[in-house]
Image: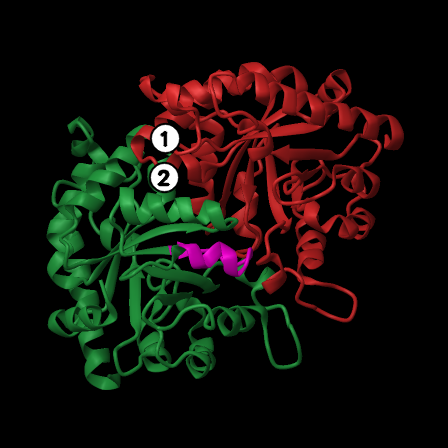
Chain colours: A green, B red
Amino acid sequence: MNRTTLFENIQQKASFLCVGLDPDLQKIPAHLHKEADPIFAFNQQIIDATYQYCVAYKPNTAFYEALGTRGWESLQKTIDYIPSDSFTIADAKRGDIGNTSGLYAKAFFEQMSFDAITVAPYMGQDSVTPFLHDNKWVILLALTSNPGSHDFQHLPIDDHVQLFEQVIKTSSQWAGQDQLMYVVGATQADRLAKIRALIPEHFLLVPGVGAQGGSLEAVARFGMNRQCGLLVNSSRGVIYAGHDKHFARAAAQAAQSLRQEMQVCLDKYL
Amino acid sequence: MNRTTLFENIQQKASFLCVGLDPDLQKIPAHLHKEADPIFAFNQQIIDATYQYCVAYKPNTAFYEALGTRGWESLQKTIDYIPSDSFTIADAKRGDIGNTSGLYAKAFFEQMSFDAITVAPYMGQDSVTPFLHDNKWVILLALTSNPGSHDFQHLPIDDHVQLFEQVIKTSSQWAGQDQLMYVVGATQADRLAKIRALIPEHFLLVPGVGAQGGSLEAVARFGMNRQCGLLVNSSRGVIYAGHDKHFARAAAQAAQSLRQEMQVCLDKYL
């Protein structure tokens, strides 16, 4: 999916919500365990219930890999099930030497038809560029939402630049705003203005709203650009909004509520 | 596997060779394509042929993921096939927020019984510590062997410290030499002395000997400690030493030849 289409979808749905498909066998409603593939059954109902309120889905590969081959099958069925006008992100945080990154690209863009993959920057240019394909996206980790983000991402490279800013500066020379997005955690929304000065046009994938404590309004205020430029992810807040047979209805309500907040932000800041 | 056993195996085999199991359908001998699982058939023969000359095996997960569910099955069969006295490394370069890294640990330490997993440091402490389990190992990327290693890993944090050194300094406070190893590329062997000053006791996983141009002798000279402290990986140089029906014999010869060089290094530097 290209940037124009993504922005059209955001306008049409008045939403920049990404739903994180992170299904955990311990947390999904008990009645689903009698299904042949409980994880896929859960995802199907979540997708059906939230589709009209979101523009993107982001399965985190760890949740599937933890179940072995069976989990990998559930992931394949899930990506096949997501409607093609939804933007799909493999939250895989891969990155390796060139020929190996090329194989990860094959795994997520060919074997599975994801639009985007999250990539870790530590190994540099030749670990990132093999993911650049037509109408596919690299979403590079810049500033994450977890406590450990302070260990290295904030290290000063010189008096004015921290590591996460240097990662953005350097990597934005490898690809443009039509192939590259960045992960910027919502828990550090005050940094968004500084990041926007470096990359005014790029889309940002923003985790950390909800369970991790980030504010949607602050993210929109500091981060929105003229093509929205934001995909805000919610995982647990949507998919575990309910715990019983009516979980899908609860997920729909949670997604709808986020969409309403997003519509206000779009009206105010776009 | 604990450090004592690993060192005993190194002494017994007079080898610190790790064989990278990176099977590519385009490169494995043609006659294997008639097998039900060509990748596993290839790995089986490589393992049988090299077992006496190496102490570790390192499947790179990208090569399996690129084949979808089928590849994931081949990986599971491969890890089940490797003799239990070989040290096994999932070269997966994972790393995510705490609960997610915990799931990756489950995938590679429980679903599959790997001894170790390679982890990317960018997301900091809570992305790494969920991989710390009894008798399991985190192998953290410090200084990699690819050209892109110069993009960020060498950035100066202050007048004396580069990012890869800061990663080592900080992370070596999270776990000791019995749970943590580091990836240090052989193409930058001159840095090994500096790294050894920071972490004299830790094991280092060293890729880049062979196809990527690193020198085994230089790695041993600068990197060996009193418990060897090195696992030197060769992938392509061993597994694609031959291309026909006698590929396993060629792999055995390549591994044996590396083991001979290693024995000389052990005699000289241990």
Quadrant of residue B228 within the rendered picture: top right
Please state the chain letter of the residue tagged with numbered disc 2 in the rendered image.
B
Residue A262 sits inside the magenta stretch: no
Q: Residues within 10 Å of mark 2 (few under 14, many from 20)?
A: many
Which residue is at the front of the view, B222 or A43?
B222
State left or right for residue B227 relative to residue B94. Answer: right
Say whether disc 1 or disc 2 marks the residue closer to the N-terminus.
Answer: 2
Q: Residue at x 80, y 30 (%)?
A: B227
- For label 1, the residue is B72
The structure residue drawn at horizontal position 84% and vertical position 32%, both measured from the top left corner, is: B226
Q: Look at 20% across and 31% down and name the residue there.
A: A37
Q: Position of residue B151 (x, y in %)?
A: 59, 64
A93 left or right of B224 in image = left
Q: Position of residue A250 (x, y in %)?
A: 15, 52
Front residue (pair A250, B241): B241
Q: Quadrant of the N terminus of chain B?
A: top right
**Of helix, strand and loop, which one carries label 1?**
helix
Q: Is residue A70 visible?
A: yes
Separation of residues labelled 1 and 2 (CA atoms): 9 Å
Q: Which residue is mark 2?
A: B66
Q: Nearer the viewer, residue B158 or B208?
A: B208
Viewer-proximal residue among B56 and B221: B221
